[in-house]
Image: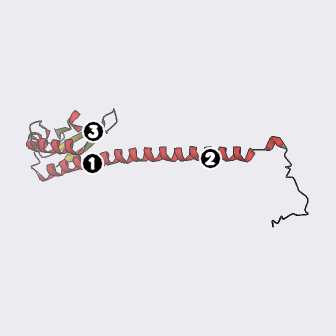
Amino acid sequence: MTMRCTSNRPRTTVSTAYGPRQMGMILIEALVAILIFAIGVLGVIALQAAMVKQVGEAKYRIDAANLTEQLIGQMWADDHTTSTLAAKYASANGSAYLTWKSLVENRLPGAAKKAPTVTIVADSATSDTRKSTVTLVVYWQAPGSSEMHNYSAVTQIR
């Protein structure tokens, strides 16, 4: 015995107030929303990439500043006469300069392409040979960059 279930309710048809031209608009609206969301996600990814690049560049600037301050500290601890400072630090053959230069080349990318410069000038306002103006310039080239960056410091050793 098979049973059939029948209903006495009349069949109803679904009609929209918008007519057949409006069919599928929800799908188009969803696709537009997905497109806008995807563009936003791409913007966030681009922002993240720019941030990572800037953090790397800031790290190299901090390293360059620390290296120049380290050499200035060594000069302050050493004999302050201009001739001694020039012989040890400004000369391309000076022992302290060569040690510091190798440290710069190891810590900063592309620093070997352009050697750091150390300029020591005696203070011309006085006859004291223990007063000098020191200018240090450190160069580096960030990975993937074509331009050389530099950090310079000027100080007086007295």
Amino acid type of disc 2? Ile
Secondary structure under the numbered disc 3 in the rendered image = strand
In the picture as drawn, the residue positioned furthest to the front comes out as 1
Q: Would you place residue 144 above or below residue 157 in this image?
A: above
Secondary structure under the numbered disc 2 in the rendered image = helix
Within-10-Å neighbours for mark 3: few <14, some 14–19, many 20+:
many
Q: Which residue is mark 2?
A: 34
Q: Would you place residue 54 above or below residue 8 in this image?
A: above
Q: Nearer the viewer, mark 3 or mark 2?
A: 2
Q: Quadrant of residue 7?
A: bottom right
Q: Quadrant of residue 115?
A: top left
The residue lying at 31 percent from left, 39 percent from top is 143
Relative side of 128 to 2, left or right: left
Relative side of 32 to 112, left or right: right
Q: Quadrant of residue 82?
A: top left
Q: Residue 148: x percent and y percent?
A: 30, 34
140 and 67: which is toward the camera: 140
- Number of marks: 3
The residue lying at 22 percent from left, 33 percent from top is 113
The residue lying at 27 percent from left, 38 percent from top is 140
Q: Which residue is mark 3?
A: 140
Q: CA distance from mark 1 to mark 3?
A: 10 Å
Amino acid type of disc 3? Trp
Secondary structure under the numbered disc 1 in the rendered image = helix
Q: Which residue is mark 1?
A: 63
Within-10-Å neighbours for mark 2: few <14, some 14–19, many 20+:
few
Q: Residue 25: x percent and y percent?
A: 74, 45
